[in-house]
Amino acid sequence: MTTFSALLRKDLRVELRTLRSLPAMALFAVSAFVIFRFGLDRTSLDGELAAGVLVPTLLFAALLAINRLFVAEREEGGFDLIRLAPIDRTVLLAAKATALVIYLVVLELIAVPIFALFFLDSASGLVPFALVLLLANVGLAATGTVISTIATMSSARDLLAPLILLPLLIPLVIAAAGAGEHLLAAGGPDYGRFGTWLALLGLYDLVFLLVGYATFDFLLED
Amino acid sequence: MATALRSVTLRRLAIATVAVMGAGYALAFLYAPEDADQGFIQKIFYLHVPLATVALVGFMVAAVHAIRHLRTGDPKHDARSYVSIHISVIFGLAVLATGAIWAKGSWGVWWEWREPTLVSFLIVFLLYATYYPLRYAIEDRERQARYASVFAITAGAFVPLNFLAVRAAEPLVHPRTFSSAGGLPDSMLFAFLVCLAGVALLWTTLVWFELDAKAASGNLGKIRRALEATA
Amino acid sequence: MERTAAVESRPASGASEPAIELRGLRRDFGERTALGRISARLEPGESLAVLGPNGSGKSTLLRVVAGLLRPSAGDVTVLGCALPRETHRLRGRVGYLGHAPLLYRDLSARENLRLAAALHGLDPVAAESRIEHLLGTVQMSARGDDRVAELSAGMKQRIDICRAVLHEPELLLLDEPDAHLDTEARLLVDPLIGPGHGPSRVVVSHDRAAATADADVVLELR
């Protein structure tokens, strides 16, 4: 069993046992949908409004998971186990980011159908939108894991991660909501600028995976 | 010895800054023609755009210093990174302020979402503003510096991506921009370049000044501690 | 305020490279000096007892030797590795038992030990039998599948000891190894972490009598 899979399985096993993040994320998302229904006074959404409700809700739910990403390491004594081991510490970044992507996919598998049930007239745009969400998840995981590590080691941990992440994730919101506006349009999905949004998401993912890979080791020193 | 040289260089920088900025704005107000569409308010372009350009380059410079800090562990690179961000954030505030004034003068509104540079700057400012709570939240000095460097690198990578994204968000047909980079008559371009040089010098002078002041107070602190230890 | 150390030791045996060599080690935390000008030398196979009142920096010293904390000044050589430059060469050769157990509370003892084995790159099959052997030695085989959170402090300590020796380290760093252990348990763990079984040892202890009895070198921190 490689170190990566050992760490990933550990995280998934702990989450399955404690259900620390997933139920909260799902409940949050559904409650948020209800709040939007009343806040906007709408029972049906399409195009930019649909994207404008779905994407930010998923983002805020993701913040819940990101805040809790290193809780077990913190309790266990602050990364000592990882730091003592003769491994490349970037493996921890990879394992945690992968776990986060998995949590986000599970969240979306629950929240997006419910969103469709509540607000959408047609679900045909959701399949291409799933690709958009997947790319956005990777970007979220890349920046989220790095910032979560920084926040975990600081004293203002619960506040710091969302504070830093929200501006940092705006390009993802722009791209995902931009794509969603077209894919969830009233008359059926329209692929205008689909390539632009995918390219932007891909670029974001690439840049921040590289940045994370290059800097993560320095976060775990000392 | 080094500090004596520093003050000489600093004084020369300050003089050069005043000279170039003076020349630049004289050119802007006296030499460059008034804009046909926007009138006098367009003159703020000679302040707003140089401030924006220099602030952005400043964030990139901070990221480079941060990389060097991580590689060498030398705290002087961290100091340079910190101060670069500090001055660039202040310039960023000035960008937002001058942008608002310009928007009010040109379009009658204090804020314009369709101006991609202004919006990008708002986002960049929001991000770099978190640099301070981040630093204050970590007590151990070495770790604080390391984490700040990782942040500076991440944020530096973010800036160009953010500009791309915000520009992509604007419908292709109707962005409302303050200036098109091309199509400036030579006289305006010349005045602009001199102003740009002046603002760049201003940034450099302010950064050097703050670094110098920090070094001095750091030395003072060391002397004080040494005195207390022997007392 | 500087802390100095008094060292008593047997004359060095000379021929081989020492397990640990400290010269003028200092560790600061901001303005506060936690360790001041510590010098000591430990030959392979010997035991070093670190004594001193609370707050004298005993745990800090252990963490520096483990490679978890960087020295602020001075020379530190552990198992032939100059810290902090060569910390990566030290990893995996040291068994560290900290103040708090390095165990994930939501995993079982076996799962924790398997994770530790994977982190140290041990062959899974060989690791499995070693885990069973260790659990048997400390008499925790029956409760090996219970979540660590459900175990008593003494049981956690025994599991943590197994974790520390799992990869057969050359050097043991033990911070209060007898904490939470009754006399019977102490006898159980002796073959794993006790003196004279092979690895060099550094033991931080409050029990002056017991620590000095087992030690070849004593380091007193003030």
Image: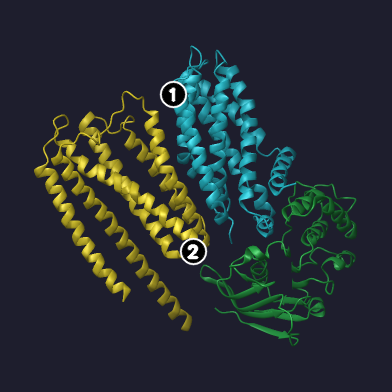
Chain colours: A cyan, B yellow, C green
- Chain bearing tag 2 is B
Q: Secondary structure at mark 2?
A: loop
Instruction: Report the residue that reaches farthest toward the left.
Output: B30
The reply to whether residue C56 is visible in this rendering is no
Q: Nearer the viewer, mark 2 or mark 1?
A: 1
Left or right: C83 as drawn, with respect to B68: right
Tell me the residue at 67%/80% (across/down): C40
x then y, percent, for residue C113? 79, 53
Q: Is residue B222 above or below residue A20?
A: below
- Chain bearing tag 1 is A
Left or right: C168 as drawn, with respect to B139: right
Say if mark 2 contacts mark 1, CB within 8 Å: no
Whole-angstrom CA distance, mark 2 to mark 1, is 45 Å
- Quadrant assignment, res C16: bottom right
Give the quadrant of the N terminus of chain B. Answer: bottom left
Mark 2 lies on residue = B73
Depth check: give the residue in front, C157 or A181: A181
Mark 1 lies on residue = A193
